[in-house]
Amino acid sequence: MNHPATETTASSVAAAERGLALAVEGVDLRFGGIHALRGVSFSAAPGQITAVIGPNGAGKTSVFNTISGFYRPAAGRIKLGGDEITDVPVHARAARGLARTFQNIALFRGLTVLENIKLGGHHTMHAGVLAALAYSRSARSEEIALREEVERNVIDFLEIDHIRNQSIDALPYGLQKRVELARALAMRPRVLLLDEPVAGMNREETEDMARYILDVQEEWGVTVLLVEHDMGMVMDISSHVVVLNFGEVIAAGTPAEVRSHPRVIEAYLGAESAVAA
Amino acid sequence: MRTGVFHETFASEERLWPSPTARGWMLAFTLVLFTMPLWGGDYALALACIVGIHVIATLGLNLTTGNAGLISLSHGAFLGVGCYTVAWLGKHGVPFYIALPAAGGVTALLGVVVGLPSLRVKGLYLAIATLAAHFILTFIFREWEAGTGGVAGTAIPRANLFGFEFAGDRRNFYLIFVCAFIMAVAARNLARTHIGRALVAVRDRDISAEILGVNLLRTKLLAFAVGAFYAGVAGGLLGYFYGNITPDYFVLTLSVFYLAAVIVGGLGTVLGSVLGAVFMTFVPEALRLIAQAGSTWFPGIAGLLLPMQQVVFGLLIIGFLIFEPHGLAAVWARVRRTFHLWPFRT
Amino acid sequence: MSEFLEYSLLGLLSGGVMALIALSFVLIYKGTGVVNFAVGEVMMLGAYLYYAGAVTFGLAPWLAFVISLVVIAMLAILVERAVLRPLSGQPAVAVLMATIGIASIVHGAVEAQWGGDTLSPPTLLPRTPVNLGEILIPGTVLGNFAVAAVLIGGFLAFFRYSRTGIALRATASDSVTAATLGININYSQRLTWVLSGVVGTVAGVLIASSAGLSPLLASAALSVFAAIILGGLDSILGAIVASLLIGWAESVAAGYLGGKSRDVVPYLVVLAILVVKPYGIFGTRTIERL
């Protein structure tokens, strides 16, 4: 499954410049009495795959939600490509290149696969409501252009052309996850947040998804930030790993470094195993 | 069986009527309706006018509630706003082709105001905010004598196209039919653009939609504004049709009527709006006919008409919710599928 | 000044009955998560059944009252079984619409059976007015408030101290966990509907006895929706406080601005509050999980 970079698509143009750096600096997050994140700081290098791992409840999805802007941190900053976005409203972050998938699939049941994916391109569309009602020439050409872009860059890329007009309910779980990824790709992302992209998948589906993620990173040059429990996949494809436990960063480094880090082993397996290792 | 439909460009697939068969049926349907004043009886024509008005109003509510999932109990009052605006403008000599869109615009602005709470609350809170708006508006209808004529109501000058007066059912039918057709096409257009998709996204999972780049506030306000615009136009046409209106037309039951039409027809589809409006128009008429027929055996049954209507509305709403939650549009789609695939089984 | 005091006191007292209606609604919402738009109609039906028992069948008022409670309880169970249970998977819009449908059916049925004229059912409470200094309070107003206060107090105690009450709160808070702990959820939810119907009926009978019975009774509930929003959908305490507040505001406005303003006051208050505190004074803002 090789798409030569010579194909003239927007994705392959200046792939190296596409991805932005993402930096989380000193983020503190509270929910009433619960201190979900404490002084979390890490960064994702541009164009690389960084993974965030940790036991359940460590705060991984909270980090994602803070980066997305859904949660406002009590302290700390989020920086996208050097620009601070902590105060940027949620819906405006998409235009800056921040895309994400969700842990519990967040596809819109009232729309078909194709419509869901097109929704990813929402922030690129500018036709006003009157133009839309009349389906004026400008609205029409915008829609057709979006359709072409989505078909070429995303649907072909993820091999989902056979299901593009189906409703979401009819799709098996693995395909739904792939459609979510497709929708995120339609956002023309520069930083892609993937929240447990292979959760609940069997081995074959996991390998397919891993391959797609690698392709996205290599060909599109997108920065990928990944939350995942599947250690095999994480260690295989990421170049940098950040470990969270109880809302704190306890380790960060290459997969090999993290794998043998005593605090990481302790977090996952308990103190005795750490001593034994 | 439908075969031989091959699209070679994306543009042709995205058309409203993508196949020659679809275009053919649509043309036939339009011609039949358009020539109705020639072959239809008086009763059928009057009913068709009412259906047309209901279709426009239901299209609007379906955008706000069906597509965007924002429950609006003020739709009936919005029709009133449109009607009174048209009355006022008509008295000041404004021709209908300006007054009607203006009424829609005024109502749309009001829709934005009513929809403002939606940016912070959802579900029931929003429903009750719209309920509050309904009561405040109907209060104004009743009490603001200078503007609306108060409880006695007001007259509406007939629509006038350079001397051609739209008096009587036959002429009003054309006005209503043309408006309904245009606005139905507009609603379908909206559905195939990014705005239409955003509305559905806001209904299904608004937080995820926001993270994908949808401006929730703008989209929700837009849903209210467009829905209200449709209601305003429907109200204006109502005024031109009846020539006279009093505030007790715009009661809460009217909003419930349109909600029922949206549910019965099918949430979120233009076809659903049309089917729902047609169905709900025939229900009171059918009841009336039954009451007339039954009055020979049960004298005084005519007095039961309004309460019986309410019972039937309620039963329809509940029945469709339990047994056909996707409404008549889904039933229609099932029937169509059978015909498309005939002689093969579905 | 004594005018203001009179309006205020009357308003607060009538707010007591409103609080009963609000309680009827909040019980269902807290217990089953259902938004019940048929609160007013249930109340009205209960009052009409009381009338039927006391006047049409000539029973003693207390007996008629008890019978109407029983019938409403049975109807509540029927509605829960036939309508709410089949819809339990569907989105909130659908259930809300279903209750609107129920409201429509009940309203139509009542009007078909008893007509639109105002009827006078017998009173259960003494009518003698009470003098508080210069202020004259009709006996029914005071009586209604007393009954409402006792009932609400009883409910608050019930929810805090009785086993069934705590089981209902558990089911409301987290039905799955409650089930694993052995609480019968179906029974709890059904009981919630029954209690709600009973409370509504009491309110309906109280209002009907003092102010007359007609299908318009149901619209008394509409101003209660304003109180519910004001108090926060899921707070019993909030519903009570808000009802008193709205009752007070209605009375003062009616006194100074004329009776018609009573129609709009609750709604203006609601809209004003929603702008400032969208989830009501006591409501909890739900934290949604992504």
Image (tube, rainbow, N blue to C red):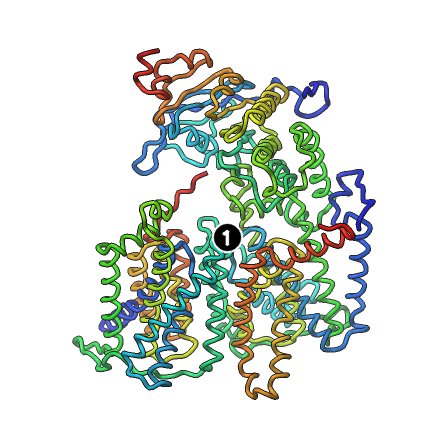
Q: Position of residue A112 (x, y in %)?
A: 63, 43
Dividing the picture into quadrants, the one containing residue B336 is bottom right
The mark total stands at 1
Q: Secondary structure at mark 1?
A: loop
Residue B1 drawn at (x, y percent): 80, 51
| Residue assigned mark 1 | C90
Disc 1: host chain = C
Q: Tell whether A48 sits left or right of B272.
A: left
Q: Is residue B49 above or below residue C184?
A: below
Which quadrant of the figure has residue A183? top right
Residue drawn at x 54%, y 77% is B306
> In the rendered structure, which amino acid carries the disc numbered 1?
Gln
Q: Residue at x 36, y 85 (%)?
A: C57
Instruction: Pick whichever, A6 or C129, lies toward us.
Output: A6
Left or right: B73 in relation to C128 = right
Q: Is residue A13 above or below residue A199?
A: above
Q: Residue A161 in the image: x percent, y percent?
A: 69, 34
In the picture, measured across the screen, residue B136 lies left or right of residue A131, that is: left
Task: Please give the name of the residue rendered at 32% of the width and 48% of the height, measured from the top-left corner.
Answer: C182
Q: Residue furthest left?
A: C133
* Percent position of residue B233, x then y: 64, 63
- The residue nearer to you, when weighing A217 against B137, is A217
